[in-house]
Image (tube, grey):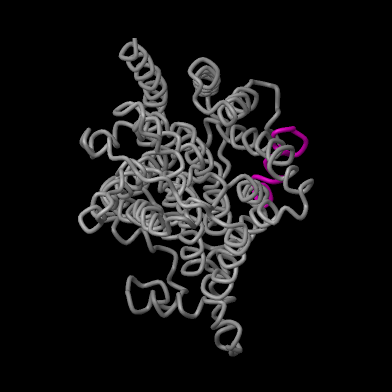
């Protein structure tokens, strides 16, 4: 029976991919025959095209990278008074960012042919079926699926400016940092950092999972060189954050670095978040043996209330001093968690965790679904983002698993490598998947609480990676 269910799930995924592949073929052939310009022989330089006004600040240099990170810290900004030259350079950088967005391939395009809207309608209904019929993260996929269906109904105009309902929702909170900040506040109120506090070395697994984020930068360079895409370094950084499996952070970073690509990045990030139970288990089983999956881990030590209350404040202070660009995300996370752990305002904590989180999740997911239009999805650049997002997510999962195996070479008390896959920041989905795969190998081996350590570390790690990108490349 389980084998039959797996086969059915696989068929569903293949159906979705096949629909999008057919649409892509038609879209690519149309674009190819419509081209009227020569394509350069090498695309390796396209990653940093349109950054000439940055005066070498973003050259690929380790020393310059570390210097720029040092100058972006809160400590430096507190003690350093900017010179007139630095103010002028910052102004030029902002103008360069605006110039880089002028020729964005994700700007609004003419209406797609009607058959493409029909394809998107099918995809929307399939998303709803996966949520209800198969139980794949219904809290995310049901509103995303309905948003996809509603925005693609011919003549309904629900996604049209200025008065379409879905257009209003998107502009109100998805197209800016409002909804992502509220989501991070709710995540903080829902999250127990106790497993990470009890076993701090789990932070290494959350950090290792961020390798997928940075690895994807090379994937973008490869696509520019050999496939003919035109991603800039700002767009590459925004795409890479998808590897953290964190929808709110992906929206936040794309809003800062590549606003024109926010729609498809949000769709890809939330899609992979919802498909964590399908994507991660094959990778986990491929990179671990049954013996490793059966490793039992000790019960975590009790964590005091003082530790739980001080942890979010300590996290916020470190972010203020070292990476203020990550403070909007980490600050809201710390705010929600501090209210939860202090028990001083139970009504506020429960509102953050329940009513507010549910309302914002519905609106955010509907807004993401409203961007599933053929003009944005059925095009070469969009399929490149979807592919790179999957690559980033797969590499992040693998890096967490391999880091756990590497740590076992030096630890007397071995770590079950499965919890390394929870280093991505899909909380608590990735931890639940690690626990489920562990139970398949040993029905009495419960890994959930141990997996929550790297899982919450992954949330912090992705926020830090976002801050690094914004500090390095943001205006």
Examine the structure image and report whether residue 342 is included in the region drawn in magenta.
no
Rendered view: 325 above or below 71? above
Residue drawn at 49 percent across, 57 percent down:
197
| Residue 82 position in % (x across, y down) | 59, 87
| Residue 352 position in % (x across, y down) | 71, 45
> In the rendered view, does 223 fall on the left or right side of 449?
left
Residue drawn at 29 percent across, 50 percent down:
404
Splitting the image into 4 quarters, where does residue 327 fall?
Answer: bottom right
Q: Is residue 419 visible?
A: yes
| Residue 409 position in % (x across, y down) | 20, 55
Magenta span dominant secondary structure: helix
Point out the stretch of residues depicted in magenta. 161-179
> In the rendered view, does 135 fall on the left or right side of 442?
right
Q: Nearer the viewer, residue 111 or 176?
A: 176
Q: Nearer the viewer, residue 254 or 183?
A: 183
| Residue 427 position in % (x across, y down) | 51, 42
Rendered view: 416 above or below 435? below
Rendered view: 172 above or below 150? below
The N terminus: image quadrant: top left
Residue drawn at 26 percent across, 55 percent down:
407
The C terminus: image quadrant: bottom right
Q: Nearer the viewer, residue 79 or 307?
A: 307
Residue drawn at 55 percent across, 32 percent down:
372
């Amino acid at each position: 029976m389980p084998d039959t269910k797996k086969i059915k799930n696989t068929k569903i995924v293949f159906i979705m991919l096949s629909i999008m592949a057919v649409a892509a073929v038609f879209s690519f052939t149309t674009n190819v025959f419509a081209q009227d310009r020569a394509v350069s022989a090498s695309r390796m330089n396209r990653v940093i095209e349109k950054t000439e006004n940055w005066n070498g600040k973003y050259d690929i240099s380790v020393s310059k990278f570390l210097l720029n990170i040092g100058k972006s810290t809160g400590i430096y900004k507190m003690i350093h008074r900017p010179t007139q030259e630095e103010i002028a350079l910052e102004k030029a950088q902002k103008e360069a960012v605006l110039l880089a967005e002028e020729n964005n391939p994700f700007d609004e395009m003419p209406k797609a042919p009607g058959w493409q809207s029909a394809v998107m309608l099918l995809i929307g209904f399939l998303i709803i079926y996966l949520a209800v019929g198969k139980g794949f993260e219904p809290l995310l996929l049901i509103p995303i699926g309905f948003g996809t269906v509603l925005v693609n109904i011919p003549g309904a105009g629900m996604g049209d400016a200025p008065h379409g309902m879905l257009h209003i929702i998107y502009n109100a909170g998805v197209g800016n940092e409002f909804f992502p900040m509220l989501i991070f506040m709710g995540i903080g109120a829902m999250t127990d950092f106790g497993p990470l506090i009890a076993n701090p070395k789990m932070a290494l697994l959350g950090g290792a999972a961020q390798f997928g984020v940075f690895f994807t930068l090379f994937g973008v360079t490869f696509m520019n060189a050999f496939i003919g895409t035109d991603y800039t370094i700002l767009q590459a950084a925004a795409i890479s954050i998808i590897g953290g499996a964190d929808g709110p952070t992906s929206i936040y970073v794309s809003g800062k670095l590549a606003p024109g690509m926010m729609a498809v990045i949000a769709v890809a990030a939330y899609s992979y978040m919802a498909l964590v139970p399908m994507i991660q288990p094959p990778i986990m089983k491929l990179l671990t043996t049954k013996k490793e999956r059966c490793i039992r881990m000790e019960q975590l030590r009790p964590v005091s209330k003082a530790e739980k209350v001080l942890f979010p404040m300590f996290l916020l202070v470190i972010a203020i001093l070292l990476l203020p660009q990550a403070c909007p995300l980490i600050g809201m996370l710390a705010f929600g968690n501090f209210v939860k752990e202090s028990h001083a305002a139970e009504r506020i904590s429960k509102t953050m965790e329940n009513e507010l989180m549910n309302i914002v999740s519905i609106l955010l997911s509907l807004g993401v679904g409203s961007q599933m239009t053929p003009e944005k999805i059925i095009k070469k650049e969009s399929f490149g983002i979807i592919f790179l997002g999957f690559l980033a997510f797969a590499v992040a999962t693998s890096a967490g698993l391999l880091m756990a195996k590497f740590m076992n070479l030096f630890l007397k008390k071995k770590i079950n490598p499965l919890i390394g896959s929870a280093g991505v920041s899909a909380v608590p989905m990735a931890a639940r998947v690690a626990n489920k795969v562990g139970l398949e190998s040993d029905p009495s081996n419960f890994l959930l609480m141990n997996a929550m350590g790297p899982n919450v570390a992954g949330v912090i790690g992705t926020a830090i990676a976002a801050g690094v990108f914004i500090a390095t490349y943001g205006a």
